Image (tube, helix red, strand yellow):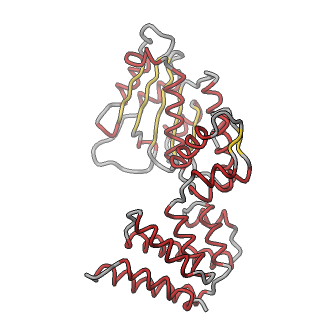
Amino acid sequence: MIIKEWNAIKKQQFSPVYLLYGEEEYLLHETKQLLIQHVVPEDEMDFNFSLHDLADEASLEAAVEDAESFPFMGERRLVFVDGAMFFTAEKKKEGKQVTDVLEAYLQSPAPYTVMVIHVPAEKLDERKKITKLTKKNATVIEAKKLTVNDIKGWIKSKVADHRLQIEDKAVEKLTVLAGTNLFMLAGEIDKLALYAEGSDMIKYEDVVLLTPKSVEHNVFDLIEYTLNGRTAQAIELYHDLLRQKEEPLKLLALLSGQFRLIYQVKNMSGKGFSQQQIASRLKVHPFRVKLAGQHAAKLQNEHLKTIMLEMAECDLSLKSSSGRKDMIIEIFLTKLPKLVS
């Protein structure tokens, strides 16, 4: 987690240079917003803030020149450098940024400037001189996908920003209902905080009342109902999703993806892999692995293979049929309990 760096920014304890990268877009977005809020006052933004997007033909030389310029009627300048792909192994056809000027700047960054370099990539090329030098002279913030426990800690921190607390079981329910997308969770927390105005606690009942289920969690419920013989409930939920304008083809894709994940989790668990190791190897969130594991425990490999073959037939029917496509998945859901018996 990057809570320590965020707290330092809030206390105006800035580094002269920040290097941001990673796959969790929300954490990158929040870090940028915190720097914008705290480095330069709003009434100085027009003349003490600049953005240089290297992916849009901006030059690194111009960004460094900006960083070396004294702030105008203020204490600090804030310089954003986006699209810094020269920190990665990716080769670009449209030309190469000359990094000498940045290397020289990193040796003695301007004390009145905060430079923020964003690399839109999951990893850096650790072999490159510019990477080594920047990691030595800058604050590096890697926005990793959060673990389930990290997300729970992040929810509590986000709730605390509203000067509220949240019950532990409410945290658990929120992650189950809303999923692990931080942008979505942040919106739900804002809504819950408004509802809790006048109180000091977000309660479990508030989460149940106000938080809609994600499509992914509804698909999890579809599988749960059918595997437990509650076909009528599964059909009712499926019709609800259709009324919410969810497309049958999208729902089939989500169902197929979930059953494929269940199959992979079952096989990898049988080989002794932990949930965290499975998540890392499959590049999915540990929370999804945890949910898939619950279903994997109830199913045999033969059942899963039969289900996936049946879903392939459904996919073909959906793409070739001119009739009622919604009925194809409904028939599959009614057949599913027999496929696993």
- Whether residue 285 is situated above or below residue 65 in the rendered picture: below
Which sits in the foreground, 206 or 108? 206
**Figure quadrant of residue 248:** bottom left
Quarter of the figure with the N terminus: top right
Query: In this view, which residue lies farthest toward the top?
Result: 73
- Whether residue 3 is situated above or below residue 151 in the rendered picture: above
Q: Residue at x 65, y 72 (%)?
A: 293
**Figure quadrant of residue 249:** bottom left
Q: Residue at x 66, y 33 (%)?
A: 198
Which sits in the foreground, 334 or 287? 334
**Image x and y of residue 98, in percent:** 37, 34
**Image x and y of residue 324, in percent:** 31, 80
**Image x and y of residue 291, in percent:** 63, 68
**Image x and y of residue 5, in percent:** 63, 33
Which sits in the foreground, 25 or 292? 292
Query: In this view, which residue lies farthest toward the right?
Result: 168
245 relative to 94 in the view: left or right: right
Q: Residue at x 54, y 16 (%)?
A: 111
**Figure quadrant of residue 119:** top left
**What is the tally of numbered marks visible in this picture?**
0
239 relative to 232 in the view: left or right: left
Q: Residue at x 42, y 19 (%)?
A: 45
Quarter of the figure with the C terminus: bottom right
